[in-house]
Amino acid sequence: MVSVTPIRLGVNIDHVATVRNARGGKHPDPVKAAEIAIAAGADGITAHLREDRRHILDDDIDRLKDRITKPLNLEMAATRDMFEIARKLRPHAACIVPERRQERTTEGGLDAAGQLDSLRGFVDDLSAVGIRVSLFIAAEPAQIEAAAAIGAPVIEIHTGAWCDALAARDSVAASAEFARIGRGAELAASAGLEVHAGHGLDFISAEEIASLDQIVELNIGHFLIGESIFSGLEEVTRTMRRAMDRGRSRTSGSAT
């Protein structure tokens, strides 16, 4: 028999908070969105607590930790202020991401190779308080090897360049980027790292990348929240879950 390992779906609820903050007040509530996504099949919730608090707020993280029934993945910059917040709240996981206040969204992967020494200490500190750490990096051998050297047990591959090429209908660039992701996932898995992926994924690209059996989790936010305006978050989460499962069914699996 061949057994296929299911792929997890993490739903990022940042942009529910973006809509709320555009007017102020409490509506729409990102915690309610997280609960709807979980009921519809999400395996976890991701939220990025930015230093400028442009969408998710500290109170959102507190309430998510108290109320959701699935793991919370806290995206955060590698700063001492963020460490203290994580140390206090103890989310299931923390994903270390690069952050610039001028950017509209995370523009690329973390330079793990260039920050090896400082990140090693930061990852050690988070791990010491029981938080599972991932590094959000490009699918480049130098970055993957640095992540392993740093001691992070998980990487999340930045899929933005591939998704941009797909959106531009640039089949040559898209094929090259997908191959790069596949090679990176293989290298990371061979180094003993758990491999996640995310950024810019939609139903079609999520289904395709789910066919890479080294990738065990996708984190998806902006597309799902945008589509929920038209179809509702419950329906789009279920649709994404089905797309990912179809993609996963195309993997070779492992013999049992």
Image (spheres, rainbow, N blue to C red):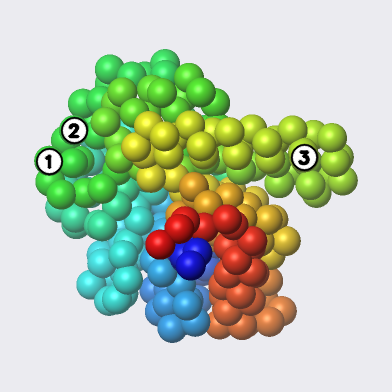
Q: Give the alpha-carbon distance from disc 2 to disc 3, as whole Å.
A: 36 Å
Quarter location, residue 194: top left
* Neighbourhood count class around disc 3 (C-alpha, 10 Å): few under 14, some 14–19, many 20 upward: some
Instruction: Find disc 1 in the rendering and name its residue.
Output: 128
The residue that appears at 41% across and 23% down in the rendered structure is: 145
The reply to whether dot 2 and dot 3 touch (C-beta < 8 Å) is: no
62 or 170, nearer to the observer: 170
Please state the horizontal and vertical placement of residue 195, each as a whole percent of the image. Answer: 44, 45
Query: Is 119 or 210 nearer to us in this picture?
Result: 210
Q: Position of residue 76 (x, y in %)?
A: 36, 44
Q: Residue at x 68, y 40 (%)?
A: 178
Residue ID for mark 2: 124
Estimate the spatial distance between the alpha carbons at disc 2 and disc 1, rounded to whole Å.
6 Å
Q: Is residue 102 above or below residue 21?
A: above
Q: Can I make out residue 130 in this image?
A: yes
Please tell me in which quadrant of the rendered image residue 183 appears: top right
Give how far apart the Cα atoms at labels 1 and 3 are: 39 Å
Secondary structure of residue under mark 3: helix
Q: Residues within 10 Å of mark 2 (few under 14, many from 20)?
A: some
Q: Is residue 231 above or below residue 252?
A: below
- Tell me which amino acid carries mark 1: Ala
Q: Position of residue 113 (x, y in %)?
A: 42, 19
As shown in the figure, which amino acid type bears the numbered disc 3?
Answer: Ala
Residue type, numbered disc 2: Asp
Front residue of this view, candidates 225 and 37:
37
The residue labelled by disc 3 is 174
